[in-house]
Image (spheres, grey):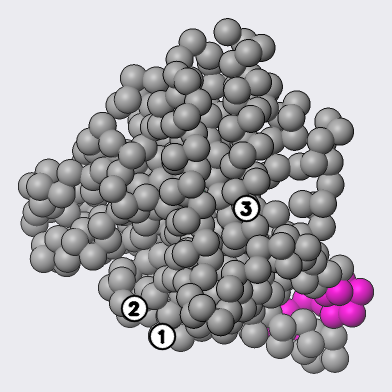
Amino acid sequence: MTPSTAFEVGALRAQFPILGTSVHGKPLVYLDNAATTQKPRVVIDALVDYYATSNANVHRGVHYLSGRASDQFDQARATIARFLGAASPSEIIFTRNATESINLVAQAWGRATVSAGDEIVISAIEHHSNIVPWQLLCEATGATLRVIPMSDAGELDLDAARRLMGPRTRMLAVTALSNALGTVTPLADLVAMARSVGACVLVDGSQAAYHMPIDVQALDCDFFVMTGHKVYGPTGIGVLYGRAALLEVMPPWQGGGDMIASVTFERSTWNVLPYKFEAGTPDISAAIVLGVAVGFLTGVGLDRVQAHESALLAYGTEALQQVPGLRLIGTAAHKASILSFVIDGIHPHDIGTIVDLSGVAIRTGHHCAQPVMDRLGIPGTARASLAMYNTREDIDALVAALHHARKVLL
Ligand SMILES: *Cc1c(COP(=O)(O)O)cnc(C)c1O
């Protein structure tokens, strides 16, 4: 961040209409960003604008509107390719969400590549979306799922990772940032390990993509997934980045319209990238609006967002520890954006319910990471998660609500 361009959080907040609303008669304090982020006015307007001015199906029509919708759709793909540092827009495949992106790889890449005796390596801190698709693949093929263990702090054990990876490893699928603990994983080390045994790498960037700059070529991953609704975009749209050389040789996942070059009853042939993996009419409006959201995020600047959020994380870490009986869950040396915690004698759900009455939105439970909770021997946590528009006042409101919750519940 250059000193001349201070991060103007007040001006930024003004662009998010929902942040000016109240819940239970209290100003909304939104700290559930790891579940989904709120949307800026440009994103909301773009959605309405698309249906008011451009709605038509893409790729098929010769008429004006179809051309206009197709142009906007192509532009969105190009914007997202630049955002992720992809070599070409044809490496960007639109899906429904990060979960579908991972399932696409596990099925289309997995069934063509993985056989009995092979191994898929994931980590102990994965979201269920980066566990279950690989379990399904292992069940179908006879491959084995291996898991890089975590420490009590939520850090991955790199020595164990090195021992786990070998000649049978076909895929390393790992998150860049844990949604339950805030751990930032050492991707460079992990990717190097996978490369040294000839394995492919999928990075779950669902959290990372709105907290830190991403460059898939510098990361040297084969696949990278993200989900629209967390990068300030709409629900119903996700992205799979895949290295072109791999996507080219992968069979299609779903069959139908748009993904074919030709169809006869005897045999069909496949369309070029990225269309080979986009069967049926896509969520055109969501894809276009995702391009707008990513443009917005780029305009604010992910390096600036990262600096702002990391200062706020440090402030929140300090402030929460002043609450009696509170224990932070996830204390990795390299963390981002997530404050997961438990309070002695109070169930996480009760914490969430009471602070909601003060207008403070946090999430409670296992955060789609049940193995993390099992490993730590807790039923779940309360989790405050940060985004670009959060402030110290938000943290202060959370802390005040937690003091109140202790008074009410203990
Ligand atoms: C949210 C999230 C997902 C799943 O995103 P969907 O939009 O539900 O597909 C996967 N991994 C991580 C780390 C997440 O935070």
Q: Which residues are magenta?
A: 49-61
Q: Is residue 245 visible?
A: yes
Find disc 1 in the rendering and name its residue: 87
Q: Residues within 10 Å of mark 1 (few under 14, many from 20)?
A: some
Residue at disc 3, CB closer than 8 Å to ligand 1? no
Measure the alpha-carbon separation of dots 3 and 2.
31 Å
Residue 374 forms part of the magenta stretch: no
Mark 3 vs mark 2: in front: 3
Label pair 1/2, CB-CB below 8 angstroms? yes
Label disc, if present, on residue 217 of the rendered structure: 2
Find disc 3 in the rendering and name its residue: 390
Q: As shown in the figure, which amino acid type bears the numbered disc 3?
A: Asn
The quarter of the picture where residue 4 lies is bottom right
Q: Nearer the viewer, residue 328 or 125?
A: 328
Residue at disc 1, CB closer than 8 Å to ligand 1? no
Q: Position of residue 169 (x, y in %)?
A: 17, 54
Measure the alpha-carbon separation of dots 3 and 1.
33 Å
Measure the alpha-carbon separation of dots 1 and 2.
8 Å
